Image (cartoon, grey):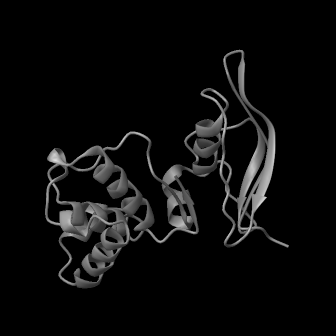
């Protein structure tokens, strides 16, 4: 049986410090996994390993049975892995709505900026607005993020991660 996500024997070392040692787990459709632990326990390292930001000399990652170890981040995004960032960095010159529309178009084209200029953006804008509503920040849709409170920016970051309609959403 193919699991939605499977991590096999991941070990990641930074200098002499092992951030992950022989970590293995799997997730199936509809599974929810929470990682808890003190600072430095390897939580972020593991998430970054799954997304392809960190690499491991041992072990591998599979998405729906497809081995994705070695694939760059953008290819993993196109396959359906999305992660919100700890440090929020929205496009400050774009509204909340356009930030989400831009994210939604990322997996559709090699040049995501094109998504802002496509004439038939109505569906993408509606989907983005639906995500903003779902996260309780639709009232900020036309606002610029530069003056928004951190809580709103965090929710914008989640909306951007959800915009690609991922198979795996890492928060």
Give x and y (percent) for residue 153.
30, 50
Q: Residue at x 68, y 50 (%)?
A: 69
Q: In which quarter of the image is residue 156?
A: bottom left
Q: Quadrant of residue 113?
A: bottom left
Q: Residue at x 65, y 51 (%)?
A: 34
Q: How many labels does the image show?
A: 0
Give x and y (percent) for residue 101.
28, 68
Is 27 left or right of 110, judged from the image as shown? right
Give x and y (percent) for residue 56.
70, 37
Q: Residue at x 21, y 77 (%)?
A: 118
Work out whether 167 lies above or below 55: below
Residue 50 or 79: which is nearer the viewer?
50
Give x and y (percent) for residue 46.
65, 41
Work out whether 25 lies above or below 28: above
Is 122 left or right of 14, judged from the image as shown? left
User: Which residue appears farthest toward the right when viewing the image?
Assistant: 1
Q: Residue at x 66, y 72 (%)?
A: 30
Image quadrant containing the N terminus: bottom right
């Amino acid at each position: 049986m193919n699991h939605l996500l499977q991590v096999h024997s991941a070990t990641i070392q930074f200098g002499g410090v092992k951030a992950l040692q022989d970590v293995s787990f799997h997730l199936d459709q509809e599974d929810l996994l929470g990682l808890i632990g003190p600072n430095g326990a390897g939580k972020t390292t593991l998430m970054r390993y799954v997304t392809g930001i960190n690499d491991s000399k041992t072990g591998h990652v599979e998405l729906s049975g497809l081995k994705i170890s070695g694939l760059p981040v953008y290819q993993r995004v196109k396959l359906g892995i999305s992660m919100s960032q700890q440090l929020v960095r929205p496009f400050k010159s774009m509204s909340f709505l356009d930030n989400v529309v831009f994210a939604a178009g990322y997996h559709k084209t090699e040049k995501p900026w094109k998504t802002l200029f496509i004439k038939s953006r109505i569906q993408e804008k509606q989907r983005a607005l639906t995500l903003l509503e779902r996260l309780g920040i639709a009232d900020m849709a036309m606002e610029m993020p530069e003056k928004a409170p951190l809580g709103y920016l965090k929710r914008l970051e989640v909306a951007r991660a959800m915009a690609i309609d991922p198979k795996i959403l890492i928060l």
